[in-house]
Amino acid sequence: MFLGIDIGTSGVKAVVLDEHGAVAGQGTAALTVQRPHPLWSEQDPEAWWQATTAAVRAIDPAVRRAVRGIGLAGQMHGATLLDAADRPLRPAILWNDGRSHAECRELEEKAPDLHRVAGNLAMPGFTAPKLLWVAHHEPELFAQVETVLLPKDYVRLRMTGEKASDVSDAAGTLWLDVAGRDWSDEILAATGLNRAQMPRAVEGTDRTGMLRADVAEAWGIGEVPVAGGGGDNAAGAAGVGVVKDGDALLSLGTSGVIFVATRDFRPNPARAVHAFCHCLPEMWHQMSVHLSAAACIDWVARLTGTPGAAELFARAESAGPASGPEIFLPYLSGERTPHNDAEVRGGFLNLDHDTTPERLAQAVLEGVAFALADGLAVLREAGTELSRLSVIGGGARSRYWGQTLAAALGVELVYLQGGEVGPALGAARLAQLAVDGGSAQEVCVAPPTSHSIAPDPLLAERLAPKLARFRDAYPRITPRNV
């Protein structure tokens, strides 16, 4: 059996796969995000470790004892700064933190080859601008930085004593030469760092160390190998068989992502398309990234006093698609693709005296779908053609939302059994590859299809006027134009 651990933003998920690839056990533990100032988003690295231990120990002890290898997945971009004793110097600055927008401009000036080497625009979500911010605003702390790790790699350090990062996650720092799959000395120097402060770069299927004896005892697991793993989206792709050129998925987690596997490096930074390494050797991928997706569901549920996501979907369904004039702009944490705007914020438009919680819920489902449609449009501009998307993440539980998504995107959505398990599933499969070998095509197979949703042309026609108004709204609300 193989254990996959996903260090997410809202929680840690641990999943064990048996020898047939079926889920044999799983556990979860919640995390919270701290927002001490506008644009800030932080977490305590110790909370990741405590939640990881809790999630693993929630799995049946007999299942844990049978584990032969562990893989890691995690939220990308988080700046975890360690001192010479490997102690965190401050809370980690997360992927949806927007404070470093000025430093993005500075980085692009200091590293003129950034787009060519890193394959991406400098955005506040990435790790490198965060370190420039720390250098400017917390210089005494910056001087103590011995190592910079990503969230899952801090957990790896606690598990194994080793400092390593797989290239799919490392590509999201902006310090990686993405085509060469190694650190770029030039871009590191532009942020006042060097490769000695980086973990070693590995492939997702590489072994990075063994589980420490004390951790193995506490977790009830043997001293087994720990694989490189992957950034959350790449690991999620491996979990559902998105491993060949042109395979694609839609991830409906806290953020929303359209992910397309590619056999070569295909950057398109002009439209805020991400181009990263895959967690599988000799593979890359493109992504459109939207900072708020299922997070919007939780937000509007709290706003309207709805007990949870399931009830929120039911409320939206009672209103029906395009049931009112309300438009929701899902930029609660800013936006990446296609706007690259950390300062823009979400909002409702066209509210009236007849607006109800049900219509607000429906508008939120539509607004997220419209943002994803914007992302798919720029992927198509970059030459990516696709007609179907495998769906993963917590948002995959709602068939009703799937109808709106399929119509807005104009593609077939394929829902997979266990797809909501997400990146932890792929992390477990990367562990299997690290321990037993084999090919990704043999190990990282798509789970059985649960159901699929084809785009409804009549629904697409009903949504089209609202999509046009949605697209017209962004230029009017962005702080850049106010």
Image (tube, helix red, strand yellow):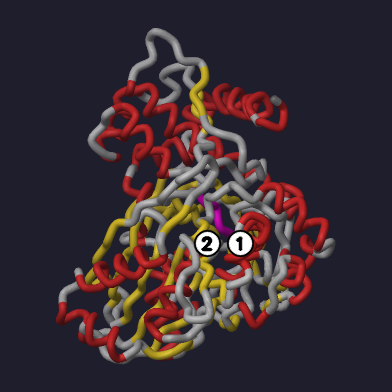
SS at badge 2: loop
Name the residue type under label 2: Gly
Identify the main secondary structure in magenta.
strand
Residue, disc 1: 127
Residue at 61 percent across and 66 percent down: it is 142
Query: Around disc 1, counting alpha carbons within 10 Å, would you say few (fewer than 14), some (14 to 19), or many (20 or more)?
Result: many
Quick check: can you spot residue 364? yes
170 within the magenta span: no
In the image, residue 27 lies at what x, y percent? Answer: 24, 66
In the image, residue 296 lies at what x, y percent? Answer: 42, 38
Which label's residue is closer to the chain start, 1 or 2?
2
Along the viewing direction, whichever of 292 and 286 lies nearer the viewer: 292
Quick check: can you spot residue 242? no
Does the residue at mark 1 contact the one at mark 2 (Cβ under 8 Å)? Answer: yes
Name the residue type under label 1: Thr
446 sits left or right of 258 in the view? left
Q: Which mark is residue 78?
A: 2
Q: Which mark is residue 314?
A: none
Residue at 16 percent across and 79 percent down: it is 61
SS at badge 1: helix
Report the Cα–Cα distance between label 1 and label 2: 6 Å
> Magenta residues?
256-260
List the single residue furthest toward the top: 353
Along the viewing direction, whichever of 187 and 327 lies nearer the viewer: 187
The quadrant of the rendering that contains the N terminus is bottom left
In the image, residue 430 lies at what x, y percent? Answer: 44, 78
Query: Around disc 2, counting alpha carbons within 10 Å, would you say few (fewer than 14), some (14 to 19), or many (20 or more)?
Result: many
